[in-house]
Amino acid sequence: MPEMLEADVTRMNKSSLLKGSIPILLAIIALILGTAPSFQCETLQFSQVENDVGHLLLVGPYSYRTKYAKEWSDQTFAAQTCRNYNKNGLEFKFEKDSKTQTVWAFSIMTPIIGALIICKSFLDLTCGGVSGYGGNSSYSCVGYSYFFTAIFQGIVLIIDQSSLCFDNPALQYLEANNPDLASTLSDECEVTTGYILQAIAVALWILAGAVTLYFKDIVLIYEQPQQAQEVTYTQDADGTAEEAKVVAEQPKV
């Protein structure tokens, strides 16, 4: 292969790998931003509206914590780090609606599906020389799958319309065990850091899908290096030619 052509192929492959890596990177960031808040406790918050001393109840799909925990009058309830609503936490049987159960389900399914799609996208990009991987149709499939994951991630955002917002398990516990403290907290939740990060994750999943479809004509050239041979002949007095030496040239890397 001529040296100039090899350089062109190298540039083409680098460009294709760069284009293919952009949506994968966006998807990985979306996966992290969308998953982490679900297993932390700063998606929603309840502020203190009476006897305000700065108390703040922070909650997520599975747990809660109290800001400035040492200042809370109920130290049994107060928690500086995330505490589960039931198992190894409050050990309190609470009521939940269908939207809360939906949030729980999709907070588990979304990262699993997202991770599988990212793996598929990575294989399509890096195993293009293997039969069964790569190709325009495969990249298009991955692009639409990112859109599908964005919908799943968006469903997790209904947490602010679920009983985790209007009848949170932590508040149910307080109402049953310390109604005076419960009455000082707002009945309405507010979105906070985790919710915003998950909303950004939805946008990133969509962007990853759009970029994948935009760059779906990615072409990677997989060609085995060619080996050249130099053959030297000698001519006898009677005019016949004989092979004298064969030299194999090493392929250029």
Image (spheres, helix red, strand yellow):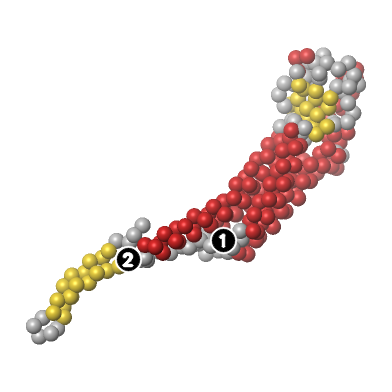
Residue drawn at (73%, 49%), measured in percent from left and top? 150
Q: Nearer the viewer, residue 42 or 15?
A: 15
Is disc 1 surrounded by few (<14), some (14 to 19) or many (20+) residues within 10 Å? many
* Left or right side of 50 for 112: left
x and y, in percent, of residue 44 in the image: 79, 32
For discs 2 and 1, the disc positioned in front in the rendered view: 1
Residue drawn at (83%, 37%), measured in percent from left and top? 160
x and y, in percent, of residue 133 in the image: 55, 61
x and y, in percent, of residue 106 in the image: 75, 45
> Can residue 38 be seen here?
no
Q: Outermost residue toward the front? A: 4
x and y, in percent, of residue 15 in the image: 52, 56
Q: Outermost residue toward the left? A: 237
Residue carrying label 2: 227
Q: How many marks?
A: 2
Q: Nearer the viewer, residue 52 or 98?
A: 52
**Mark 2 to mark 1 CA distance (whole Å):** 28 Å
Label 2 sits on a secondary structure element that is loop
Q: What label does residue 247 carry, if any?
A: none
In this rendering, is residue 171 above or below 141? Answer: above
In this rendering, is residue 85 above or below 240? Answer: above
Residue drawn at (55%, 63%), measured in percent from left and top? 132
Q: Quadrant of the C terminus?
A: bottom left
> Can residue 171 be seen here?
yes
Residue drawn at (84%, 25%), measured in percent from left and top? 47
Looking at the rendered structure, the kind of residue marked 2 is Gln
Looking at the rendered structure, the kind of residue marked 1 is Ile
Residue carrying label 1: 218
